[in-house]
Amino acid sequence: MITTDVKQEKLTQFIKGKKEEDLIEILHFTQDIYNYIPREAAVQIAKELKIPLSKIYSVNTFYSRFNLYPKGKYCISVCMGTACYVKGAESILNKFSDMLGIKVGETTEDLLFSMEDTRCVGECADAPVIIVNNIVYRNVKVSDVPNILADIGEDIHE
Ligand code: FES
């Protein structure tokens, strides 16, 4: 595991000589090493590039691929597009939320699970759909949620 100091040093080296127009590239690099954009890193980037911190947060908010909080090892994305929504996606999302004790956009304390909602993922014929990392679960029912989490649990303990 890379320690925070090592990560900070890597970021410091990467930023050297960079300019404001390199901000997106720097944020990608930061997310690659930390798995999200920590506030300390955002402050460091703002200082090095001599730009306001708010500029970094506005870019982060605009580009949804940048995470402001650590993501879990398993990211559960529940499709909330129309086809999935009318077939009960909200109940599925609530079941995951109840079982994991987190809401959309949050991560469990053990950093194992994150939850997010997503727009249509193009699998409407098999709605409702959820994606765990890159595995697609189709025609999901609320009653499937415990089994899906149990499957992931087995994967964790392998
Ligand atoms: S609305 Fe969920 S896959 Fe299209």
Image (cartoon, grey):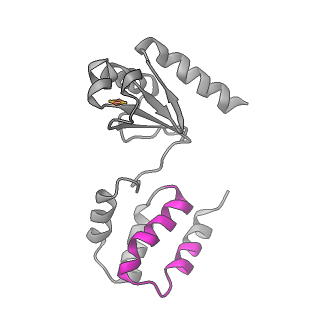
- Depicted 13 relative to depicted 112: above or below: below
Q: Residue furthest bottom?
A: 17
Q: Is residue 55 above or below residue 89?
A: below
Q: In this orientation, does residue 127 appear?
A: no
10 in magenta: yes
Quadrant of residue 79 in the image?
A: top left
State the image coordinates of residue 12 (x, y, percent, origin top left).
Answer: 53, 78
Q: How many marks?
A: 0
Find ligand 1 in the image and state its quadrant.
top left
Say whether residue 125 is visible.
yes
- Residue 115 place in picture, x, y as percent: 42, 36
Identify the residue at horizontal 58%, vertical 75% (top origin). 9
> Residue 153's image quarter?
top right
Please state which of residues 48 and 86 is positioned toward the viewer in this rendering: 86
In the image, farthest residue toward the top: 143
- Residue 75 pos. (x, y %): 49, 38
- Residue 103, given in percent of the width and then of the height, sits at 36, 34
The reply, left or right, for residue 136 in relation to residue 87 is right
**Residue located at (34% from left, 61% from top):** 60
The residue sitting at the front extreme is 125
Residue 140 lies left or right of residue 152; in this view the side is: left
Q: Residue at x 42, y 51 (%)?
A: 69
Residue at (44% x, 29% y) in the render? 130
Q: Which residues are magenta?
A: 9-35
Placement of the N terminus among the 4 image quadrants: bottom right
Q: What is the quadrant of residue 82 in the picture?
A: top left
Q: Check the picture and name the quadrant holding the C terminus.
A: top right
